Amino acid sequence: MKQLWVDICSSYGVDLTEHQAALLGTYRDWLADEAMVAGGIGPREEERLDERHIGDSLFFGAKLPDVAEVWDLGSGVGLPGIPLAVLRPETEFVLLDRAGRRADLMKRAVRILDLENVQVLQGEIAHIPEPVPAIVSRATLPPDVGGKALSALLQPDGIAIVGGSWRERPIYEDWETHDVGSEVLDHPVWLLIMRPR
C-alpha cells in the first residue's frame, strides 16, 4: 500500500482501504507499462506517477461532494477520473476524451481494474447531452477560457473542479482557489472550483 496515497486521503478524512490501494497500484503499473508506451503519458513521467498523477488526482476528492455522477472532461488516460472512481465506487464516472486512441486506452484500464462504475466515451465536450452534477478536469481547458463553457454544462447546484500544474497560486475570475495537500506534500497543490451563478 502506497503510504502517500493513504496520507493524501487521510488529509481530508477518507480511509483508503487495502483493496482500493491495490487497485491504484494496478493502475499505476498500467500507466507505466502501457499508457506511457502508447504515448498517453509523457515518457519522463514514470518517477512522478505516484505523486504528480495519482496523488494529485486523489486530492480532487477533498472538494468533490457526494453526487450520483461525475464527468471527467479531457480525461486522457483516466486522470483524475479513474483514481476517483476507485475511491468512490458508489458514484458513476463518465470519462470523456476527444481522441479515440486515448479512449481505447482508458477502456482497457477500466477492464483491467474491473470498474463497474466507469463509462468511457469518445467525443467533444460540447456534445454532453444535458447538464451534469459535477465535472472534474486536469489541465484540459484554461480556466480563463473554459469557465463559461463548463458553467453551461453544470446543473444549477453543480460543481466544476479543475487542477493544473501551476507554479504560483492561481487566481481566475469566477473561480475559487483552494489549497490542498500542504500537510502531505512538499509543494502546494491548488484546485479551482466553480459553481453556476
Image (spheres, rainbow, N blue to C red):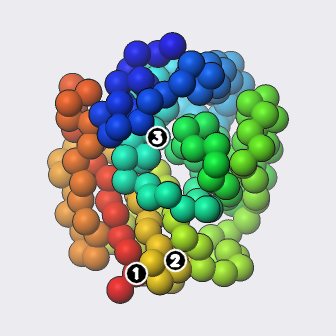
- Label 2 and label 1: CA atoms lie apart by 7 Å
Q: Secondary structure at mark 3?
A: helix
The kind of residue on which mark 1 rests is Pro
Residue at the spot 22% in from the left edge and 48% down from the top edge: 179
Mark 3 / mark 2, whichever is N-terminal: 3
- The image's mark for residue 119 is none
Image quadrant assignment for residue 194: bottom left
Tell me the kind of residue under disc 3: Ser
Secondary element type, mark 1: loop
In space, the residues marked 3 and 2 are separated at their CA atoms by 21 Å
Residue in the foreground of this view, choosing between 157 and 179: 157
| Residue at image mark 1 | 196
Identify the residue position indicated by label 3 in the image.
Answer: 57
State yes or no: discs 2 and 1 in contact (Cβ < 8 Å): yes
Tell whether 159 sits left or right of 174.
Answer: right
Between discs 2 and 1, the one toward the N terminus: 2
> In the rendered view of the protein, which quadrant contains the C terminus?
bottom left
The residue at 54%/70% (across/down) is 133
Residue 26 coordinates in the image, percent (x, y): 66, 21
Disc on the earlier residue, 1 or 3: 3
Residue underneath mark 2: 154
